[in-house]
């Protein structure tokens, strides 16, 4: 499926749309012809590499995007390494996957002990070789998400998963054409990036990228405004940030405006309609485990949208995806009753990377033999089968669309104190989005500067608490457990 | 208002919003140089600037402000 649906179609785009632009990166255009030569150059070097899983430094340039396609055409899998995240974290990922070879377009590489292929120094290659055939069960990428045990956990996504996603989006009726100008605002370590570069390239359209270094909502606005983007997948926090400026925004050319990554506020969405009067607006939902997104709700614009607590409904399972809502005893809930949302189908990962324990907790096989993933999201189905999202079962939160386990931050902070201090991370929202704050018990209050530096050396910036508070004694609830709610009230 | 005065006022806004008392800004600094000067704090910083100087910045103007110096220039010209 991947060979036909993805590789052959990409080959077709590279051949047919040679003179059209494939990418616009930092204001510079790169044609499909140029992309094709760059892919061939990376493949030439990669061809001699025997291992399957290849590290990829996730820069924002043509070399990096060409590297992804080269990896796939060589039948291999890419593991993105974020250039802005602590080296410790990236080295942990390298160790977990046992990565030997890393594709890096940076001027100087951070990776001294690996086989580094400096993609920016490779000259364009004219000679084309046919793609390596590879089974759908082999991997396309492995992404690492926040893990509650203090280590990032790997989610391997197969070529079959990606192909199933592409097929499903098309069946929803979302189809791009070569004239489209498409937004790619995501870091390559975030799977929403995959839809944002892949769908346009499959259609011969142009991808307009945002660097991880930029202030996202501003960079997004600049691209929308200057290039009149026609298709955009965004995290809702972007339009939330743009709210005060909506009267400046008018993009009648927008055909598809998709949201995913966190709850979409109904008022933000309504204000956004005015900016994109001709667009189909969709609210998507899905964890990395089920490949990019797997439920979809088409917003109705002219009549009331379904919502719960001000959050837009996440719709129905996409074609090829199965959803059920179950209670604590694993029994399916009836209409309108809240329970945990579980996902199955062709987009579902085969399981976490080398983590049997986590796999046993998170996946189960139902009586009909279907393998389901427990999302940890509390949802309910309405009479028409649309899914309403209520919240999380655990301490996972979203910060700017990034999935964050508060317990991972706590775990790292406890390491700083050699496990001798109690710490609690909470998330608060005063209207400008989720903010992480931390409380530490019985420690020296040196402004938390050293603790903060330690956290910065281990965690990506979006996981760093904005404030650290030192409390003499943590309040306890009636079960003699740390009263997280009360701590949140004290420091929030 | 002079550019220097704008920088001074801006430093106190940054110190407050980013919760870093000793922050030292210079004209060349960008969001890349300042820890935690990100999407969320930037919104707060801009709205603080708008209320303190009683000015209104358009988003088209904000996105052209590539560093602290440009931000100071915008404050000076808008406050006139």
Image: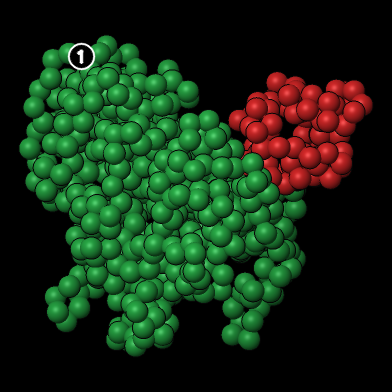
Chain colours: A green, B red
Query: Which residue has dot 1 on it?
Result: A125
Residue lying at 47% horizontally and 23% vertically, measured from the top left: A27
Residue A221 appears in view: yes
Q: Position of residue B28 (x, y in %)?
A: 70, 21
Left or right: B9 with respect to A374? right
Residue lying at 59% horizontally and 62% vertically, measured from the top left: A267
Q: Position of residue A408 (x, y in %)?
A: 49, 57
Q: Is residue A158 above or below residue A478?
A: above
Left or right: A231 with respect to A464? left
Q: Nearer the viewer, residue A380 or A348?
A: A380
Q: Is residue A456 above or below residue A223?
A: below
The subunit letter for the residue under badge 1 reads A
Judging from the image, what secondary structure is the residue with disc 1 in?
loop
Q: Nearer the viewer, residue A379 or B13?
A: A379
Residue lying at 44% horizontally and 62% vertically, measured from the top left: A299
Q: Nearer the viewer, residue A441 or A80?
A: A80
Q: Is residue A443 above or below residue A372?
A: above
Q: Position of residue A348 (x, y in %)?
A: 24, 60
Which residue reaches farthest right?
Answer: B1
Q: How many marks?
A: 1
Q: Nearer the viewer, residue B30 or A420?
A: B30
Quarter of the rendering containing residue B48: top right
Quadrant assignment for the C terminus of chain A = bottom right
Residue lying at 34% horizontally and 57% vertically, measured from the top left: A293
Residue A35 appears in view: no
Q: Position of residue A356 (x, y in %)?
A: 25, 62
Left or right: B21 with respect to A294? right
10 Å crowding of disc 1: few (<14), some (14-19), many (20+): some
């Amino acid at each position: 499926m991947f060979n036909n649906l993805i590789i052959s179609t990409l080959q077709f785009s590279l051949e047919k749309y040679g003179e059209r632009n494939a990418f616009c990166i930092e204001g510079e255009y790169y044609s499909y012809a140029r992309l094709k030569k760059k892919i061939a150059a990376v493949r030439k070097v990669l061809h001699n590499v025997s291992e399957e899983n290849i590290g990829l430094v996730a820069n924002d340039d043509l070399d990096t995007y060409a590297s992804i396609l080269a990896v796939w055409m060589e039948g291999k899998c890419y593991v993105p390494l974020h250039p802005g995240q602590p080296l410790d974290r990236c080295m942990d990922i390298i160790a977990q996957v046992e990565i030997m070879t890393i594709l890096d377009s940076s001027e100087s590489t951070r990776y001294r002990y690996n086989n580094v292929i400096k993609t920016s120094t490779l000259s364009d290659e004219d000679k084309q070789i046919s793609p390596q055939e590879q089974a759908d069960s082999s991997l396309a990428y492995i992404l690492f998400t926040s893990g509650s045990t203090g280590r990032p956990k790997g989610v391997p996504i197969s070529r079959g998963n990606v192909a199933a996603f592409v097929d499903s989006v098309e069946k929803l009726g979302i189809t791009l054409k070569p004239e489209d100008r498409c937004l790619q605002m995501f870091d390559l370590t975030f799977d929403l990036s995959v839809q944002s570069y892949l769908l346009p390239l499959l259609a011969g359209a142009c991808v307009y990228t945002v660097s991880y270094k930029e202030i996202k909502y501003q960079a997004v606005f600049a691209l929308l405004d200057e290039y009149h983007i026609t298709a955009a997948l965004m995290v809702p926090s972007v339009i939330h940030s743009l709210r005060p400026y909506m009267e400046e925004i008018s993009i009648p050319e927008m055909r598809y405006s998709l949201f995913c990554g966190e709850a979409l506020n109904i008022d933000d969405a309504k204000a956004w309609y005015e900016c994109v009067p001709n667009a189909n607006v969709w609210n998507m939902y899905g964890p990395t485990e089920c490949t990019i997104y797997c439920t979809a709700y088409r917003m109705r614009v002219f009549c009331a949208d379904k919502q719960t607590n001000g959050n837009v409904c996440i719709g129905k399972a996409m074609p090829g995806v199965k959803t059920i809502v179950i209670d604590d005893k694993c029994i399916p809930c009836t209409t309108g009753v809240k329970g945990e949302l579980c996902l199955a189908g062709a987009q579902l990962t085969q399981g976490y990377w080398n983590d049997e324990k986590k796999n046993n907790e998170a996946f189960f096989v139902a009586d009909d033999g279907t393998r389901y993933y427990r999302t940890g999201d509390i949802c309910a189905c309405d009479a028409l089968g649309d899914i309403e999202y209520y919240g999380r079962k655990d301490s996972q939160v979203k910060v700017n669309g990034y999935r964050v386990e508060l317990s991972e931050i706590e775990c790292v902070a406890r390491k700083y104190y050699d496990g001798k201090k109690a710490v609690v991370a909470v998330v608060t929202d005063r209207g400008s989005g989720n903010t992480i704050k931390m409380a530490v018990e019985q420690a020296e209050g040196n402004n938390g500067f050293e603790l903060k530096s330690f956290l910065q050396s281990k965690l990506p910036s979006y996981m760093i608490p904005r404030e650290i508070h030192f409390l003499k004694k943590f309040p306890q609830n009636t079960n003699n457990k740390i009263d997280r709610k009360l701590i949140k009230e004290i420091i929030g | 208002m002079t550019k220097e005065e704008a920088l001074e006022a801006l430093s106190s806004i940054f110190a407050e919003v980013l919760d870093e008392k000793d922050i030292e800004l210079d004209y060349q600094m960008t969001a890349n140089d300042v820890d935690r000067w990100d999407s969320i704090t930037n919104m707060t910083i801009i709205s603080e600037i708008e209320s303190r100087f009683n000015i209104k910045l358009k988003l088209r103007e904000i996105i052209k402000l590539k560093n602290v110096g440009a931000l100071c220039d915008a404050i000076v010209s808008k406050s006139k």
